[in-house]
Image (tube, helix red, strand yellow):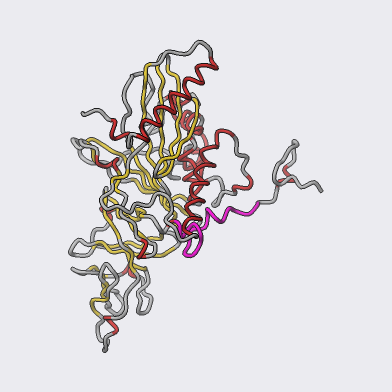
């Protein structure tokens, strides 16, 4: 029998294509001790929404670990192993103390760093020698971020320039759980080609919510990609009459992304704008991903939670079939997408680059090195490179020359933004 598993090249040939190949375990497995899991644990990740911590502990699962997050009476936030160190009762049923959390079963009280504060009825000094497992946290932008790696390797928190723009504030975060492996959600971040198909279909049907895409995205444009100090960007350059519109979408390693406004249409000339939204795709385990979207809004309006279309499975199934969006396209690739069964083409160059960057980080950790993107200097503000820029440049005489002009313009704008320290530095005073 001919083996056509890897490349099917005849009609009605599904019989030869039935075998589901092995997953790419280097990228897909995130539990303790796995290559990608240990890589992930070198970074800070959002694990909860600050406003959700009001009086009751919250059980969560991150990177294959079961944990509990809570805010004690003093306002301090703790992230502890879910099961009590005594007899393994779940601390999701723990009682919040002025300082720490009390296990409901036998009353052991744990501080936010895992120190045992009280051990009722127990003699001896075990209280001073035993700890509950705990991870350090930082609260930023209305989110709780955790570092789950080796204590002696803890980096500085990478504060994003995107959230230091005067006149703007983060909206209420939107949180969804996707029943799929994290890379297939993250890949989309560096796949601008899908906007011309998937999101144009949304635009043609009049949907998209706060982050909806304009009809101008129907044009594929000229696509390119470039590395940044903290990840990479895609560069999509489109012609809009006598204007050239350059769009940079950003991937910050490993789980963060910055998405420029989807309402841009390229009709009005302007300098690089700022990124209107950020997002994180944090592995819950090998088959579930925590998606957090955070949109910037003017600080003159009351905070609200924007509608972000198509990022969950809550719409009616028939509607999802008629107007599918990101959730439907990415979750439907199987719980764990099989990279060996893909047919990557020129529009997937960014996906290939992104996966290679993550592999480089995984292998750096295995060599005992810091992976790229780690921040070691205190109070570092990480630049934002995503943006929309529109320049008045009339078309070149021929289609071929104009395509070359678009590519050169996109690369020039991207270089200016990356070497200039980020798009937020180029925004005119408002």
Query: Seen in the image, is 140 located left or right of residue 63?
Result: left
Quadrant location of the C terminus in the rendered image: top left
The residue positioned 55% from the left and 33% from the top of the image is: 347
Residue 151 falls inside the magenta stretch: no
Can you give x and y, in whole percent of width and height, for residue 155 in the image?
34, 57
Q: Pick whichever, 209 or 44, lies toward us.
A: 44
Q: Give the residue furthest to the bottom.
A: 123
Return the residue nearer the eye: 402 or 58. Answer: 402
- Which percent across, then down, holds residue 32? 47, 64
Q: Position of residue 170 (x, y in %)?
A: 26, 42
Q: Is residue 59 above or below residue 235?
A: below
- The correct choice, above or below, for 157 with respect to 78 in the image is above
Q: Quick check: can you spot residue 180?
A: no
Note whether 363 is above or below 318 in the view shown.
Answer: below
Q: Residue at 25% of width from left, 86% of height from top? A: 121
At 36% from the left and 68% from the top, the residue drawn is 81
Q: Which residues are magenta?
A: 21-39
Labels in figure, total: 0
* Residue 152 as seen in the image, left or right of residue 55: right
Instruction: Let me know if residue 424 appears in the view.
Output: yes
Q: Magenta stretch containing residue 38, yes or no?
A: yes
**Is 252 on the left-hand or right-hand side of 336?**
left
Residue that appears at 58% across and 33% down: 346
Q: Nearer the viewer, residue 266 or 93?
A: 266
Q: Where is residue 413? Give x, y as percent.
A: 39, 28
Farthest-out residue, right: 1
């Amino acid at each position: 029998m001919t083996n056509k598993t890897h490349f099917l090249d005849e009609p009605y040939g599904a019989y030869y294509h039935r075998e589901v190949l092995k997953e790419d375990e280097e990228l897909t497995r995130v539990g303790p001790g796995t290559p990608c899991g240990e890589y992930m644990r070198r970074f800070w990740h959002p694990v909860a929404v600050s406003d959700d911590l009001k009086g009751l502990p919250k059980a969560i699962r991150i990177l294959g670990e079961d944990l509990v997050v809570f805010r004690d009476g003093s306002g301090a936030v703790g992230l502890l192993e879910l099961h009590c160190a005594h007899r393994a009762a779940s601390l999701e049923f723990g009682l919040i103390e002025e300082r720490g959390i009390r296990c409901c079963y036998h009353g052991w009280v744990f501080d936010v760093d895992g120190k045992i504060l009280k051990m009722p009825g127990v003699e001896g000094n075990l209280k001073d020698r035993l700890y509950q497992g705990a991870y350090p946290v930082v609260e930023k932008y209305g989110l709780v971020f955790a570092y789950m790696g080796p204590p002696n390797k803890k980096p500085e928190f990478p504060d994003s320039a995107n959230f230091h723009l005067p006149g703007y504030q983060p909206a209420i975060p939107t949180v969804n759980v996707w029943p799929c492996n994290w890379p297939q959600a993250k890949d989309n971040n560096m796949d601008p080609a899908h906007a011309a198909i998937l999101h144009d279909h949304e635009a043609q049907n009049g949907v998209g919510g706060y982050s909806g895409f304009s009809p101008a995205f129907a044009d594929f444009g000229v696509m390119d990609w470039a590395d940044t100090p903290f990840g990479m960007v895609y560069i999509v350059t489109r012609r809009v009459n006598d204007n050239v519109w350059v769009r940079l979408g950003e991937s910050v390693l490993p789980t963060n992304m910055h998405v420029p406004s989807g309402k841009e249409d390229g009709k009005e000339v302007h300098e690089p704008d700022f990124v209107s939204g950020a997002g994180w795709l944090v592995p819950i385990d090998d088959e579930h991903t925590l998606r957090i979207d955070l949109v910037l809004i003017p600080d003159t309006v009351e905070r609200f939670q924007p509608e972000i279309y198509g990022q969950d499975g809550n719409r009616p199934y028939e509607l999802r079939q008629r107007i599918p969006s990101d959730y439907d396209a990415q979750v439907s690739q199987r719980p764990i997408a099989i990279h060996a069964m893909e047919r990557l083409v020129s529009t997937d160059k960014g996906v290939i680059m992104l996966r290679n960057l993550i592999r480089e980080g995984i292998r750096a950790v295995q060599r005992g090195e810091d992976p790229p993107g780690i921040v070691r200097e205190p109070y570092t503000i990480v630049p934002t490179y995503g943006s929309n820029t529109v320049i008045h440049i009339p078309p070149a005489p021929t289609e071929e020359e104009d395509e070359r002009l678009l590519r050169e313009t996109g690369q020039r704008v991207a270089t200016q933004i990356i070497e200039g320290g980020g798009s937020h530095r180029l925004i005119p005073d408002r």
